[in-house]
Amino acid sequence: MKTLPYPFFRTTEQAALAAWPLVGCGDKNRIDGVAVQAMRSMLNLINMQGKIVIGEGEIDHAPMLYIGESVGAGRGPQIDIAVDPIEGTRMVAMGQNNALAVMACAPQGALLHAPDMYMKKLVVGKKAKGAINLGLPLADNLNSIARVIGKPLEKLRMVTLDKPRHQEAIATATRLGVKVFALPDGDVAASVMTCLLENQYDVMYSIGGAPEGVISACAVKALGGEMQVELLDFCQAKGESEVHRKIADSERSRCAEMGVEVNRIYSLDEIVKSDEVLFSATGVTNGDILQGVRDDGAVVRTQTLLINGMERTCNIVDSLHHL
């Protein structure tokens, strides 16, 4: 694991550089495709025995970086990898902020192995550890967080995503006087911002993708925060219909095969079972944590957040690429 930080941040850099020329093109699938190809090519150069445990989906739907795929040079440490080649493909397609190329890893068997499905997430930073319980209503959690960190509810800041499925949560928070920041996309960035030392937010609540949840958990653990999650089937996240029910039944079947449970609350130590974690995120477009890829004429600049749980460090890496 100690040999992996540099090649890992180089991997997210290359995925970001591949996607960057397509900012504003309007084609999410094309953006995702070039980033997946770049990330996979880099991963296969690394001296490791890697396995994708959270990725682009199942093998029959994702030709590369699918759940269960082996990556790496076939020698070196055995690790589990969670990838999101572009968190925020829509944001890249529309030229919006906060798009990242992101991945995380831990020793083999340390990461929650789940299908690509919806996941409810609740995240707080170090000061609020012990204050959350995803099994309780959001209002109870907000009151508990405010009490533990010594803030009145009117000064508490909650970040979520601007999605129809979050309207009830947003209404609950605003009724309590909590300040709500609803981002268009990107709950990995939101989770990290909640846990950084100079945190912009006190709590992150969202219903988003399981891949982003596992990746976020690696960063949260290395930064000393706390996180709880719950897998939700498609009907629970999007509403009941015949089409949605078929998807939901398939998700529940895959969960049973993988040994995880829908509607079970998982603690941070169950999502990430080791402190030996690496998290790397490179900005594609400008955002609240990182600058996006910039063309300075002779060089292209990237900025990467590298969080190393083994060394308990958090670095911002600025790179110049003579392309």
Image (spheres, rainbow, N blue to C red):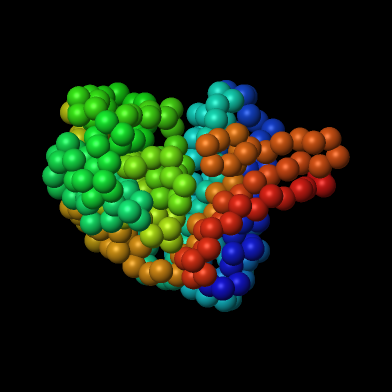
Residue 229: image x %, image y %? 27, 50
Residue 158: image x %, image y %? 32, 36
Q: How many marks?
A: 0
Image quadrant where one finds the C terminus: top right
Q: Residue at x 55, y 30 (%)?
A: 97
Q: Nearer the viewer, residue 241 or 237?
A: 237
Q: Is residue 153 above or below residue 319?
A: above
Q: Residue at x 59, y 46 (%)?
A: 282
Q: Nearer the viewer, residue 228 or 312?
A: 312
The reply to whether residue 307 is in sight is yes
Place residue 191 in its image quadrant.
top left
Q: Is residue 4 above or below residue 168?
A: below
Q: Residue at x 43, y 45 (%)?
A: 199
Q: Nearer the viewer, residue 179 or 204?
A: 179
Residue 42: image x %, image y %? 64, 57
Relative to 63, 136 lies left or right: left
Residue 148: image x %, image y %? 23, 50
Looking at the image, the residue that sits furthest to the right is 298
Relative to 295, 124 lies left or right: left
Q: Residue at x 62, y 39 (%)?
A: 291
The reply to whether residue 254 is in sight is no
